[in-house]
Image (cartoon, rainbow, N blue to C red):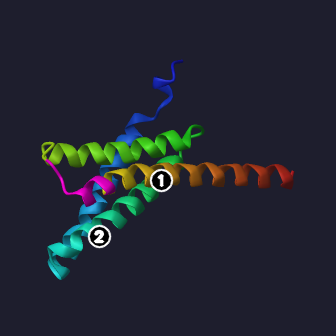
Amino acid sequence: MSTFARIHWVRVLIGGFLAEVAVFAVVIPVFLLFGRHAVPYAALSASLVTCFLFALWVGRRIDSRLVLHGTLVGVVATLLYVGLTLGRPEPPAYLVAHVLKIVGGAAGGFCAERRRKTMRTATADAR
């Protein structure tokens, strides 16, 4: 089976979509409460955290290549936002937020992989 086929695309697409929806769920109330000057700060942290959490979620049912899957969650979230804005130029903070989405997804995949290895080691030690 090819490398391309082993990627769980449905989970990656759902995870990326939900991560981007979660970013909006954080940023919109921040905008309403604190104004537009607070949005870049909220967008940066929300981009990192939501992609991290949804990469963890995607990694729960996948057996291998969790960092790749997590990174793809961040890439999908980024592409969704770029698609929503029709590729218009963005402020520098938003470009950093896109990088943080990918980093957050990769970090979530890394943590999911580490957790899985720890659980396997603990299970093997218990036997």
| Foreground tag (1 vs 2) | 2
Q: Is residue 29 above or below residue 65?
A: below
Question: Is residue 78 one of those drawn in magenta?
Answer: no
Of the image marks 1 and 2, the number of the one nearer the N terminus? 2
Q: Is residue 84 left or right of residue 94?
A: left
Name which residue lies at 82% across and 49% down. Answer: 124
Q: Position of residue 68 (x, y in %)?
A: 50, 39
Q: Position of residue 54 (x, y in %)?
A: 42, 54
Name which residue lies at 15% across and 43% down. Answer: 87
Q: In the image, which disc is placed on residue 42?
A: 2
Depth check: 64 or 35 in front? 35
Name which residue lies at 58% across and 55% down. Answer: 111
Q: In the image, which disc is placed on residue 57?
A: 1
Q: Amino acid at mark 2?
A: Ala
Q: Position of residue 4 (x, y in %)?
A: 46, 24
- How crowded pointer 2 is (Cα within 10 Å; few <14, some 14-19, many 20+) is rated as some
- How crowded pointer 1 is (Cα within 10 Å; few <14, some 14-19, many 20+) is rated as some
**Number of numbered discs present?**
2
Q: Is residue 50 left or right of residue 64?
A: left
Q: Quadrant of residue 1?
A: top right
For the magenta stretch, what is the residue range?
Answer: 89-96
Name the main secondary structure of what is drawn in magenta.
helix
Q: Is residue 116 above or below residue 4?
A: below
Element assignment for label 2: helix
Gap between marks 1 and 2, in whole Å? 22 Å
Q: Is residue 105 left or right of residue 36?
A: right
Name which residue lies at 35% across and 45% down. Answer: 14
Q: Amino acid at mark 1?
A: Trp
Element assignment for label 1: helix
Question: CB under 8 Å between callouts 1 and 2?
Answer: no
In the image as oriented, which residue stretches furthest toward the top? 1
Q: Position of residue 50 (x, y in %)?
A: 38, 60
